[in-house]
Image (cartoon, rainbow, N blue to C red):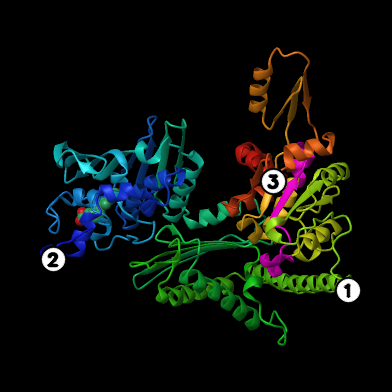
Amino acid sequence: MIIKQADLEGYTAKDIQVLEGPQAVRRRPGMYIGSTDRHGLHHLVHEIVDNSVDEAMAGFCDRVAVTLEADGSVRVEDNGRGIPVETHPQTGKSALETVLTILHAGGKFGGQSYKVAGGLHGVGASVVNFLSEWLKVEVRRGGKLYRQEYRQGHAVTTVVEVGPSEGSGTTVSFLPDKEIFGQLDYSFEELCQRFREIAYLNKGLEVSFVSHWHTDERTFLFEGGIVSFVGHLNSTKQVLHPPIYILEQADATFVECALQYNDSYSETIYSFVNSINTVDGGTHLTGFRSALTRALNDYVRKQKLIKEDQPNLSGEDVREGLTAVISVKVTDPQFEGQTKTRLGNAEVRGIVESVVAEGLTIYLEDHSQEARRIIEKCLTTQKARDAARKAREMVIRKNALDGASLPGKLADCSERDPSKCEVYIVEGESAGGSAKMGRDRSFQAILPIKGKILNVEKARPDKVLAHEEIRALVTAIGGGIGEDFNLDKIRYHRIIIMTDADVDGSHIRTLLLTFFFRNMGSLIGAGHLFIAQPPLYRIQAGKEVLYSYSESQQMDGLKRLEGRKGLAVQRYKGLGEMNPEQLWETTMNPATRTILQVTVEDAHEADRIFTVLMGDEVEPRRNFISLYAKQVRNLDI
Ligand code: 0RA
């Protein structure tokens, strides 16, 4: 961009924004919405919905209706005040057109709206407009109905008064531009996830979603707000008490939190700022954590539930088995970090800490039975953590005595650079044998696992290491376990689970995934865990051999070789039916195999799946399997 000297006079921030028009955004959409895949597409929907949610947070709207049409266009309707249509003094255009054509213009109206600036959040309705083939907006306001239309971000009509209206509100419809997004790819469940979250965080707000694209619909409305949210997160667990709820306004900051302990060993804390999920936490979360530790320790000391010389409960002790949602509403949030998902406002920490500590203290004093159950759980955790530390130290010492010897049944590779090494964790002796013979021993190690390994959901962390199969796994991988797990020490950068394609195989795979998820989580996050994909069928016609890895591939293969002489079809029921060469060729040779990388995209949802499938409550498991059959299948690929 070249700016001549004369033009610089009177050059303001406003003009810079005008330069960032549709073309700039369309040239680099990723800068504004992250990507142009399904996530970017969903981002457009959320951007528009979030504007209506802001109106709800300001107290003027209690209904948002989202419709996904069969042609891929989206309609978002709310019953708020309606975007103002009068002329905006700085732009000379209507406020409506300003919001839809000027980058980041959203927060400039309505001083008390909780608009979030920066990062990928709240990039504004204009970005959606710029990335849409067309966009239409209707405003019901002051008894009149107004309409304006755009193409690729350019107004093609003025704001036209088209008739009278009842009530007030805003409706934005748009068709994401296929020039930007290619084929549109919407996920009903992913969209619902956020709509459900919004409804939880804004009690009394109805968010409905009708999709003619998926032929499905859902309505979310929670009178209980985040208390219902915590109930939902704990729905498959045994809880220790009804949810605790704290709500307080301190200056211009709203603090709201709900918490409930369950009898599991995991911690689930969700934090939000202005209805945005702060996955990287921040000052509000820090304040919450300090408050929890402080209030529980104060109570324990005051009630003399702990000996005087016994150490305080640690943060980990008070968070094991805790499910909590902390939601704050802040007027001028500062978001930090790469993805702008960490709250930076320093003053929020103290506000949250004192509100939560006070609320908790009052609750504990008023509810002595519930308090006793919570404290007992924390004290048990403290003891168990002590025991676990001793067990870990024992294993480390024992390994040192053994000369850090690797497990006997591990067939290690000769390469020593972890980034070049992989280990196959193989179910069963015979499959292990084939894998050992079929592998490339220079960089592939094989660890056979016998029978069903420990059900980690039911076992205490300190008991996990008592199990021989687990110890073999931990020593082979080499990075330790649990809190001591060190990603830098792992001996293989590809850890590949290889099991039979039957029910037992899928059970063992789920157990292993649970184990890794709970005890070596960062390994999944860093992309080191994989699932091998052995073929389901082998078709032979003369010299030509085809392997198929899915039923549809098998259909295609059969069609292709139809009518050939001597057509032979073999269905593999287990890895053991393949000879070493076949196993290498189909499942282990990096040049020809497919392996699936395990991600923890939604760690909580994964946790739910593990808990429900492995836990001992039969009823939720049955419900769950019918409800989430799709996800379970995905997990059990
Ligand atoms: C600022 C001021 C006013 C309304 C809105 C924003 C508004 C924006 C959106 C976006 C989607 N739905 C919306 N609803 C309302 C109104 C200020 C006033 O009437 O005094």
* Rendered position, 122 above or below 634: below
Residue that carries the numbered disc 1 in the rendered image: 401
Q: Residue furthest bottom?
A: 309
Q: Is residue 361 visible?
A: no
Please, what is the three-letter code of the amino acid marked with disc 2? Gln
What residue is drawn where x is 74% and y is 28%?
537
Q: Position of residue 112 (x, y in %)?
A: 27, 63
* Magenta-colored stretch includes residue 504: yes
> Distance from label 3 to label 2 (Cα)?
61 Å
Please, what is the three-letter code of the amino acid marked with disc 1? Leu
Q: Position of residue 319 (x, y in %)?
A: 62, 68
Counting residues from the start of the chain, the first of labels 1 and 2 encountered is 2
Quarter placement of the N terminus: bottom left
What residue is drawn where x is 67% and y is 58%?
419
Q: Position of residue 113 (x, y in %)?
A: 29, 60
Counting residues from the start of the chain, the first of labels 3 and 2 encountered is 2
Residue that carries the numbered disc 3 in the rendered image: 531
Magenta region: 479-508
- 386 vs 12, left or right, is right
